[in-house]
């Protein structure tokens, strides 16, 4: 049984080495990596978020917590992908955080879960300009562009992606899925995109969008 509390605490403490060691141990011992992420490391970053909102943590602690989370994910994501190798793909997803936005933890989590659930995922990072979303989507013949925004000021980029796909005449073959804490189903509906509020729901939303394209 993995020690979820220790994983959570490593992120809360911003202890990069500890987070990495615990993630490596979980990978080596064949643990259920999705449980490790959700109940361990992601629980830690959510706690960091709460502490920041309560005024207990300041930017350095926030950054350090994010670093610890990312160190763990950098070992877990490839291991999840290896576990899926050779299985049929449910669809191709290009995922990134929109231009002007550096928050990438939630986006990475969504990408990992989509990968674990059978999607071929191309993660193009954070602060991604619209042109790059489109170029990679064309290159890999994506079914879905998944765009994350954590700032109210960067949400308009999600709309701009939907508009750019329409303008390029690609809206029949590519659907957009948006998410991130300030986004809502109403926002997604308004801009003509799919929406999910967390990584697990993103899997169902992606499945529904692909089914819609292939109908
Ligand atoms: C960690 C963090 C940071 C880190 C980011 C590190 C990194 N590499 O990601 C750092 C320190 C860099 C940072 C910087 C800033 N941040 Co910040 N940050 C956070 C914090 C505490 C946690 C975010 C997080 O990782 N949560 C954990 C993940 C797992 O959750 P999530 O991101 O919400 O993702 C889930 C869902 O939203 C969804 N999802 C996410 N993406 C997608 C995409 C798709 C397609 C789908 C379907 C679903 C989906 O699924 C995910 C998993 O369940 C939040 C507070 C909070 N409670 O959210 C503030 C917060 C987002 N930050 C905020 C602000 C203001 C900033 C700064 C402007 C601060 C500053 N003054 O410099 C800068 C902006 C920098 C920039 N240009 O982007 C505000 C945003 C306010 C707003 N609504 O606009 C928040 C809400 C804090 C607050 N209450 O004020 N931040």
Image: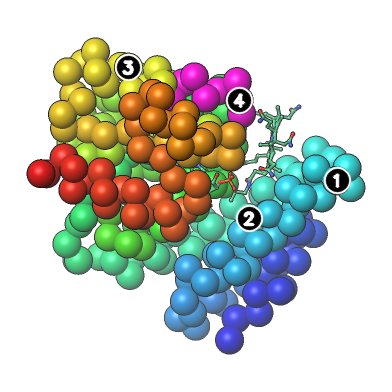
Residue lying furthest top in this view? 167
Mark 1 and mark 3: span between their CA atoms? 38 Å
Q: Does the numbered disc 3 mark a residue whose Cβ is under 8 Å from ligand 1?
A: no
Region in magenta? 151-158
Residue for badge 2: 69
In the picture as drawn, the residue positioned furthest to the bottom comes out as 1
Lower sequence index among marks 4 and 3: 4
Q: How is the image coloured?
A: rainbow
Which of the pair 27/189 is nearer the observer? Answer: 189
Q: Secondary structure at mark 4?
A: loop
State ligand 1's quadrant: top right
The answer to which of marks 2 and 4 sits earlier in the sequence is 2
- Does label 2 or label 1 sit earlier along the sequence? 1
The mark found on residue 54 in the picture is: 1
- Height in image: 7 above or below 128? below
Q: Is 155 in the magenta?
A: yes
Q: Residue at x 52, y 25 (%)?
A: 155
What residue does disc 3 label?
Answer: 163
The secondary structure type at the circle numbered 3 is helix
């Amino acid at each position: 049984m993995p020690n979820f509390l220790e994983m959570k605490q490593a992120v809360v403490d911003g202890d990069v080495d500890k987070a990495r060691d615990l993630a490596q141990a979980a990978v080596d011992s064949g643990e259920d990596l999705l449980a490790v992420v959700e109940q361990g490391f992601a629980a830690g970053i959510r706690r960091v978020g709460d502490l920041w909102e309560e005024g207990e943590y300041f930017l350095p602690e926030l950054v350090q917590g994010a670093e610890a989370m990312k160190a763990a994910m950098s070992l877990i994501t490839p291991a999840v992908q290896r576990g899926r190798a050779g299985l049929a793909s449910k669809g191709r997803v290009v995922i990134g955080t929109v231009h002007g936005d550096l928050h990438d933890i939630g986006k990475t989590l969504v990408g990992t879960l989509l990968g674990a659930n059978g999607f071929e995922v191309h993660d193009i990072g954070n602060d991604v300009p619209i042109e790059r979303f489109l170029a990679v989507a064309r290159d890999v013949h994506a079914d879905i562009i998944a765009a994350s925004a954590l700032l109210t000021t960067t949400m308009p980029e999600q709309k701009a992606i939907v508009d750019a796909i329409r303008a390029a005449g690609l809206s029949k073959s590519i659907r957009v899925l948006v998410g991130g804490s300030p986004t809502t189903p109403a926002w997604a509906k308004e801009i003509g995109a799919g929406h999910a509020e967390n990584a697990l729901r993103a899997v169902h939303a992606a499945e529904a969008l692909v089914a819609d394209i292939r109908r």
